[in-house]
Amino acid sequence: MASLTTAPPENSTNAQTDEITDEQLVFEKLILRGCFAPSVENVTSYHLIVCGLMRVLQGYCEHLTAETLQFEEVPDHDVQGKRKQCQVLLTALKDVKCPFNIKLPDLLEANIPVMKPVIEWVLRKGLLLECEDNVGKKQHANYFFKTFESEAEATTEYLKRFNEDKDEHENCMPSYDMFCDKIVQNKLGGTQTLGVYLLFNKIGCVNLLLNAKPEEDAGESPPTPQVTLDDKKISVPTVEEIQAKDKGEILKYRNKLAERIEELDIDGIINSLEARLKKEAQAYFLTRKELIFIEGHVNTAEKNRPDKIDNQVASKMTENILALTNLIRVFKKGIDEDTKSAQSMVTRFKPKLNKKGKEIRDPKTYELYTKYQNFATLFQKIATDSDSLIGRLADQATEMWKVKQLDKEVENMEDPPELTSQDYFVPIDGSIADDIIRINYNIHNAVKEYSISPPSIKGAKDYYQAFVSYVIDSMSKMSEIYWKAELMQHNRFEEKKQVEELRQKMRTIIREEVKSDILTELLNIVTLTMHTVDDDYDKLKKESYKLRGQVLELLNASDAEKKKNNKKK
């Protein structure tokens, strides 16, 4: 049996709970949180779920009174009674904003796989609320809101609170403080432990006055505790004096109980769990250090965060490029028509050849030919320049098209060193709470299996009661360590979540900066190009207007000359 109850190694990463059913696992969690006594047996699944949840919800359900949530035994055949009870529970779960969608049949049929996460959520919420009201829990929870200069300071403070802060639990035995402060701290053997509990049960209060322990390997037994009652010297037997009288059957019985205590190895279990939680406290400090590190980067980045560029700006710019391109194309089409007209006039006034193949140059006709030829060349140049402007705008449209790919490119960029640093991160030991559940399950199973009913000899019943008191105190200690482990895991997960949220926020800011820089530069270039193209387009329009005026003037002069000649005829 000892193998079942030995403490898990400090580097344990997976609680060995495969021998525990889901129903037993849920039951153990409720026991550790004080919803059921370990002595409760033959509990039904319905009783387990409904009664357990009601007991937890009594502490923090706002709109339903504790009396309303008081569990009452309902016979299995009373379906209506169960439905009514379950409806009250569903209302309470809704009141506390339970994130799980629970149906009435899940409660009535005691669907453990469905209800298990609900119970875990309710227990966690209840624990966090208890940390606001319960003096012992509040004192311990305050640790997670303190700041420390060094890892050593943080660890020392956590261990101090781990050993000193106890919740105010009504189910604890009167001997529990003695167990925490004296039994565990002094690592008494099984026989001494029984003696101390025996004496405590007799006089009701014990102060252990222990001398310093001998060095290891010194070959001496630890000194027997001496006692006083309420700090007053009262003549009472010492543990050593009481146990010195044990002979025969009572001695054998005492030794069997002492063996059970040593097999349970509660001291070793507590030391192991304390060591693991110490490592978690160290990891918590380091993660907090990382949190502060990244917070600094985020705050600086927030102050210098650029104004977010609306994607509509890029879309509007693209629309402007297309609009200007269309204007120039229409303009060029007109220029092409002017070019054709000028070229047709060039053909019309082109000098003719005589029979000998020589040009017949009429001075006036040749002058018109030369002028129209020049007009055609100038119009052609304007058309070519217009094509060049359209090409430049097409290049800018291509650049603006790249904006659509920008999000993907920026998202795939590598993170800077401050976002990839894992120097402070230590993986969360997520199995501590599960290991405590397994240990507690094994402890009370071991007690049930190996508990020895007191024989009918004088003093046996007192030893048996001392043994039972010790086991109950051990389970209370497991319960205390359990909620402290749950609180540690919750805060470590929340802290890691904050770090990841800050990392993501920093990623977003950095990518916004990069995107903003690229977009700003691109928009500046495109805007400048657009202004240049627009100016060049205005120049071309002015040239075309001037050229068309000259053509019109020439045509009018030609018409006037023609009319004059016709009158002479």
Image (spheres, rainbow, N blue to C red):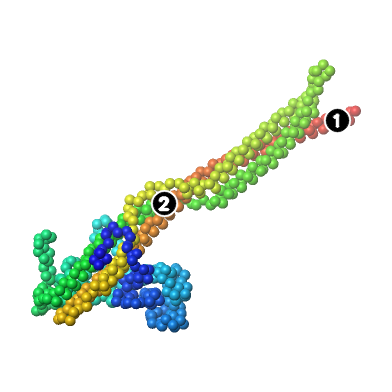
Judging depth in this view, the residue of 90 and 344 nearest the camera is 90
Q: In x, y percent, where is residue 72?
A: 38, 82
Q: Is residue 373 visible?
A: yes
Which residue lies at the image location 59% right of the left edge and 43% below the top edge?
397
Q: In x, y percent, where is residue 519?
A: 51, 46
Most extreme residue toward the right, as rendered?
569
Q: Which mark is residue 564?
A: 1
Name the element at disc 2: helix
Q: In x, y percent, where is residue 317?
A: 58, 47
Q: Quadrant of residue 213?
A: bottom left
Which residue lies at the image location 74% right of the left edge and 33% below the top edge?
340
Amino acid type, mark 2: Ala
407 lies above or below 333: below
Amino acid type, mark 1: Lys
* Quarter of the rendering occupied by the N terminus: bottom left
Alpha carbon distance from label 1 to label 2: 83 Å
Q: Which mark is residue 301?
A: 2
Which residue lies at the image location 58% right of the left edge and 42% below the top edge?
398
